[in-house]
Image: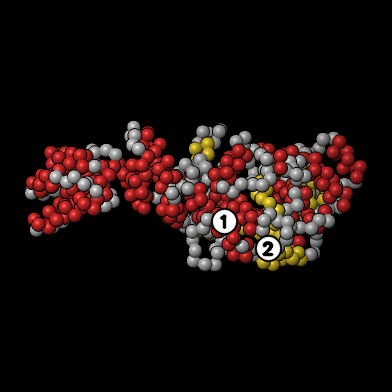
């Protein structure tokens, strides 16, 4: 592996960052850190028509929440060295200069065709059962208006006249281009099927194709790790490196994240329909006011989210599923990235969050639970809340589940489960519960172990089934047949509250 690994994540600020983009950033980050390299954030904002004002900050905030920070980027120019700026809109002169170099070397040409003229060509081809491709086949036949058929004088006259133009790449003819992808292996393509892509527009802005090649070269990118959707552009990009006389970086194209059903790319619509987020953070569309859900706001832990994403298209070659970020860095290898799409599984995402819930420190979880209690007007010592968290967290997927799992630790039941009551509260239950109150009233040491021994001794002595007492007791304390070990609950809420709740249940039921 090269000693100076430099990779980049280069999103367009056109809206919220899809989890597919987050995974691309993550794989770049893991690869960089594995090889003690540099992870760069570059904002590809050349398409000003789709630019969204708050999207860049969203991208930065999302990477911060995911704990995959960039080493160089638009918000830390103090360490940019000689590689910035990191917004393409601030690098326009560089692209213009290199578009001119391609024109001079014959690798590019001016094209003055209007949208109407191109539409006529498309329709003409369709009528003949063909597909129109602007390339070697027709670029010099005279029907298309470009600098390959116009004289230099005519070209300059058109430019000075203000005619709209684009600069197109001149794809080579009759060549088999052999390329290598770190994920997919060797790929061959016939250059005759390539179209002459637009590199530069008359508004002074480059297309993605030119800008990303120029930036990757001058930012000394060693590996381009990006989504599968860019695979069809790989041939053009390799040819652009050749045209400039530059060494190309290594390429790795990542598989798509597929819908839960397995067919098609995962979209926001899938999340809306099936009830899960597809963005790391909630996002508000400033034009429409629409809010898209985010993993953070839905209660997922960032490290669980990252663990899930890492395994969506890559496998470590072992049965291990739970990885810290450091373990992911150590294990990550592009050779173990899948060629085929990875099916997204919302239930598996929840499973990851539940696993991380179990491993979280109780103090940390307590701090997350306290604001929820505060909103409900409940104030308890941290030590008490921490004991509650410890008792319930194994049944929780999200911190938001804590209240439903633990409300009885903080307040008396306001109602009793109707089905459970009908089944377990019999005519003789009131008398049994009155006897139980007498037993509990006489206990001084109300610890779990002591209370459990004394109550069970009483039940055994009465020669009745344990369920005849334990189920009504749980209903009295909790309001339903749920919750952790019953005598742990009794110790937590205390003797007075335990007896009070039993008395209320007798009076109510």
Q: Residue 332 vs residue 131: left or right?
A: left
Q: Nearer the viewer, residue 445 or 163?
A: 445
* Left or right of 54 on screen, residue 392: left
* 424, 126: nearer the viewer: 424
Q: Which residue is mark 2?
A: 181
Quadrant where the image shows the N terminus: bottom right
* Quarter-of-image position of residue 32: bottom right
Colour pattern: secondary structure
Q: Badge 1 is on which residue?
A: 326
Q: Is residue 232 visible?
A: no
The residue most toward the front is 444
Q: Residue 100 at what x, y percent from top left?
A: 84, 45
Q: Residue at x 8, y 49 (%)?
A: 428
The answer to which of 7 and 80 lies nearer the viewer is 80
Question: Looking at the image, can residue 6 be seen?
Answer: yes
Name the residue at 68% across, 54% down: 37
Give residue 243's position: percent from left, percent from top: 82, 55
For image coordinates 86% across by 36% down, the residue present is 160
From the viewer's perspective, is 125 left or right of 507? right
Q: Label 2's element?
A: strand
Q: How many numbered marks appear?
A: 2
Question: What crowding class fits label 1: few (fewer than 14 Cα within 10 Å), some (14-19), or many (20 or more)?
Answer: few
Residue 296 percent location from the top left of the image: 49, 44
- In three-dimensional space, the C-alpha distance between marks 2 and 1, rounded to whole angstroms, equals 26 Å
């Amino acid at each position: 592996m090269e000693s100076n690994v430099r990779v980049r994540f280069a999103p367009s600020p056109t809206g919220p960052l899809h989890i597919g983009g987050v995974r691309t950033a993550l794989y770049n980050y893991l690869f960089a850190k594995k090889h003690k390299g540099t992870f760069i954030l570059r904002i590809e904002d050349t398409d000003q028509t789709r630019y969204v004002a708050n999207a860049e900050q969203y991208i930065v905030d999302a990477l911060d929440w995911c704990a995959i920070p960039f080493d160089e980027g638009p918000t830390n120019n103090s360490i940019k060295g000689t590689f910035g700026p990191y917004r393409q809109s601030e690098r326009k002169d560089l692209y213009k200069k290199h578009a001119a170099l391609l024109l001079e070397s014959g690798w590019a040409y001016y094209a003055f065709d209007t949208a109407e003229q191109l539409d006529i060509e498309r329709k003409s081809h369709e009528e003949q059962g063909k597909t129109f491709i602007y390339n070697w086949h027709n670029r010099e036949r005279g029907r298309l208006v470009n600098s390959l058929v116009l004289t230099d004088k005519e070209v300059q006259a058109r430019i000075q006249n203000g005619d709209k133009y684009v600069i197109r790449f001149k794809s080579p003819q009759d060549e088999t281009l052999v390329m290598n992808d770190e994920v997919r292996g060797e790929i061959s393509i016939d250059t005759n099927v390539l179209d002459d892509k637009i590199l530069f527009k008359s508004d002074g802005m480059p297309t993605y194709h030119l800008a990303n090649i120029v930036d990757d070269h001058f930012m000394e990118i060693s590996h381009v790790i990006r989504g599968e959707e860019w695979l069809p552009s790989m041939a053009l990009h390799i040819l652009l490196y050749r045209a400039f006389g530059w060494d190309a970086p290594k390429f790795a194209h990542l598989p798509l994240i597929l819908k839960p059903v397995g067919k098609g790319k995962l979209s926001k619509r899938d999340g809306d329909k099936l009830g899960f987020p597809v963005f790391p953070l909630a996002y508000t569309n400033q034009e429409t006011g629409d809010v898209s859900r985010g993993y953070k706001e839905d209660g997922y832990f960032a490290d669980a989210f990252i663990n899930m994403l890492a395994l969506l298209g890559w496998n470590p070659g072992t049965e291990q599923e739970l990885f810290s970020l450091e373990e992911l860095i150590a294990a990550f290898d592009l050779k173990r990235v899948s060629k085929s799409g990875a099916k997204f599984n919302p239930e598996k995402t929840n499973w990851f969050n539940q696993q991380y819930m179990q491993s979280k420190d109780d103090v940390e979880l307590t701090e997350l639970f306290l604001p929820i209690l505060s909103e409900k007007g409940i104030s308890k010592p941290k030590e008490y809340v921490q004991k509650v968290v410890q008792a319930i967290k194994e049944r929780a997927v999200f911190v938001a589940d804590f209240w439903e799992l633990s409300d009885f630790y903080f307040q008396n039941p306001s109602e009793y489960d109707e089905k459970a009551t009908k089944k377990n509260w019999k005519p003789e239950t009131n008398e049994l519960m009155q006897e139980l109150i007498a037993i509990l009233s006489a206990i001084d040491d109300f610890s779990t172990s002591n209370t459990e021994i004394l109550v069970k001794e009483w039940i055994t002595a009465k020669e009745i089934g344990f369920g005849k007492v334990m189920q009504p007791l749980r209903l009295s304390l909790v309001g339903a047949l749920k919750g952790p070990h019953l005598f742990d609950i009794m110790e937590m809420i205390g003797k007075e509250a335990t007896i009070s709740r039993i008395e209320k249940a007798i009076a109510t039921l």
